[in-house]
Amino acid sequence: MAKYRNRLPQLDGGLFLSDGGIETTLIYLDGFELPYFAAFHLLRDETGTEGLRAYFRRHARVARAAGTGFIFESPTWRASPDWAAKLGYTPGKLEAANRRSIQMMHELRGEFETERSPMVVSGCIGPRGDGYVAGEAMNVKDAQAYHAPQIAIYAEEGADLITAITMTNINEAIGVTRAAQAAGMPVAISFTVETDGTLPAGDKLGDAIAAVDAATSRGPAYYMVNCAHPDHFADVLKGEWTKRIGGIRANASRCSHAELDVATELDAGNPDELGAQYRDLRARFPQINVLGGCCGTDHRHMEAISSACLEAA
């Protein structure tokens, strides 16, 4: 059964950490092969499954040691039909992988959660296309239909929350939100932005948030920004719409998406510098309390982010 679905603890304040850049960590630091950046593919054998458990344990320990909350974000960013088909998954095997992913998050929560550190299970939804490139956007109806089966599985498996990561366009974000609403699930929408702070589709971040809110009666519980360095979006965070942003999952690297696409080495940036930038963003926007990482970040970055933000508090 879902533990926090009807009252997400992160909405009551307090700091909540999440994991870092799962795919870059698993590839560059842990030595796994992830075709199509599909972390869920590791569930196909025990070695990969243990690799995922070890990854999440490293991050959950950071939160528990710091006494913060934690978001267990399922490793399912690529666990949708189009991407899974490239890996040879039948619909039945894809459903089983999605269910197992949420079950693993529940198991890990049972291992790590304490009274000081509430831990939320989130079902991660990725874009139908590339998270770096807008591509050909679906209409809202098609986006809702495409993502609804995955969201329904997470609802059945007792996830507390749906989090859509690296949304590149407004239509898909609306479709995911409506699918979550239809399933009775709270949802967080996280947009990816380019080096100028705009979505890959060209929309301004504030306009995208306003459009999704208008089309869904302020459906998302909160919005996030991810897969960009703070230098890429800090200056565009101006206006009333910023009050809707509740989380950040920034890249360690200042590289553009085009540069990251062709990178052959990990750019881990500077964890302490990144932590200071998160601290500065929280000083400007105290409601931003869900803090994770994206490309190039790992548990060391989360330790630095946690330390900087807790020290400031």
Image (cartoon, helix red, strand yellow):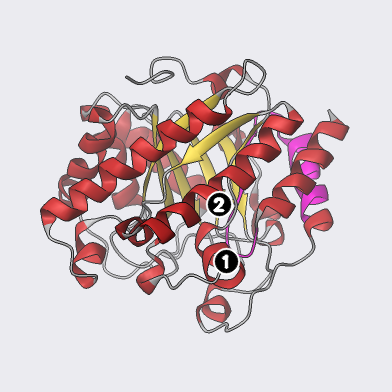
Task: Tell me which amino acid carries mark 2.
Answer: Tyr
Residue 64 falls left or right of residue 225: right
Task: Tell me which amino acid carries mark 1.
Answer: Asp
Give the percent coordinates (x, y) of residue 94: 20, 54
Tell me: residue 291, above or below residue 287.
Answer: below
Q: Is residue 271 magenta?
A: no
- The residue shown at (18%, 63%) is 89
Residue placed most toward the observer, 87 or 138: 87
- Can residue 257 be seen in the rendering of this structure? yes
The residue at which mark 2 appears reads as 55
Give the percent coordinates (x, y) of residue 273: 83, 57
- Mark 2 and mark 1 lie on one chain; the one further toward the N terminus is 1
Looking at the rendered image, the quarter that the N terminus falls into is top left
The residue at which mark 1 appears reads as 30
Q: Is residue 282 magenta?
A: yes
- The residue shown at (52%, 79%) is 258
Please provide the residue range marked out in magenta.
Answer: 274-297
Q: Residue placed farthest to the front in the image?
A: 46
Residue placed most toward the observer, 83 or 241: 83
Residue placed most toward the observer, 75 or 228: 75
Q: Quadrant of residue 74?
A: top left
Q: Are marks 2 and 1 in contact (CB under 8 Å)?
A: yes
- Can residue 175 be seen in the rendering of this structure? no
Give the percent coordinates (x, y) of residue 309: 79, 37
- The residue shown at (66%, 43%) is 238
Please give the count of numbered marks on the rendered protein. Answer: 2
- The residue shown at (58%, 47%) is 19
Q: Quadrant of residue 194?
A: bottom right
Residue 134 falls left or right of residue 270: left
